[in-house]
Image (cartoon, rainbow, N blue to C red):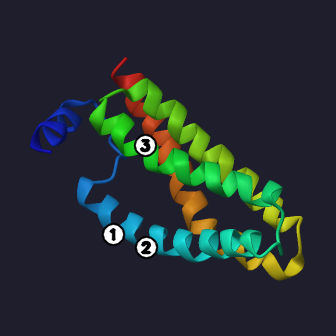
Amino acid sequence: MSSTYSWYQTLLKPTWAPPSWIFGPVWTVLYILIALSFGFVLYNTYTKKLSWKVALPFILNLIFNFLFTPIQFGLQNNILAAVDVALVWSTLVWAMYMIWNTSKKFRWIVYINIPYLLWVSFATVLQFTVTYLNW
């Protein structure tokens, strides 16, 4: 873990990059929101109240989200991490679009994921900037 931290500290980062201690609290809150909303979608898919077509982007988003850390810090590969975070952002937008168009009673899921979308948008720009600066 310390070698990973040391590696990340050596990367060039933009002046607007947040301090590393911010990421833990932010992701803790976001993972609670993700667990609530994505869990609700998956449960409603399992009980056949939602189609698997609606659940697919939520499932893909979770996969891409959980792959980011091993790619960025395990493989130490900024380019793959940039591709992955773009996939996290894309599948989140797709998921929000799908649920919004499904039913008005499920639209709260879109609203609860707005902080996640804002953070992932910021993280995407940050990752692309770090990738560019360390090319």
**Residue 53 image point, x, y percent:** 82, 54
Instruction: Give the residue type at disc 2.
Output: Val
Q: Which residue is mark 3?
A: 68
Q: Secondary structure at mark 3?
A: helix
Task: Tell me if mark 2 has few (under 14), some (14-19) or many (20+) residues whose alpha carbon lies within 10 angstroms of its own.
Answer: few
Instruction: Give the residue type at disc 1.
Output: Pro
Q: Quadrant of residue 78?
A: top left
Q: Which residue is mark 2?
A: 29
Work out whether 110 lies above or below 6.
below
Q: Which residue is mark 1?
A: 25
Look at 73% across and 59% down and name the residue there. 55
User: Mark 2 or mark 3: which comes first in sequence?
Assistant: 2
* Mark 1–mark 3 distance (CA, rounded to whole Å): 17 Å
* Mark 1–mark 2 distance (CA, rounded to whole Å): 6 Å
The image's mark for residue 51 is none
Query: Which quadrant does the N terminus fall into?
Result: top left
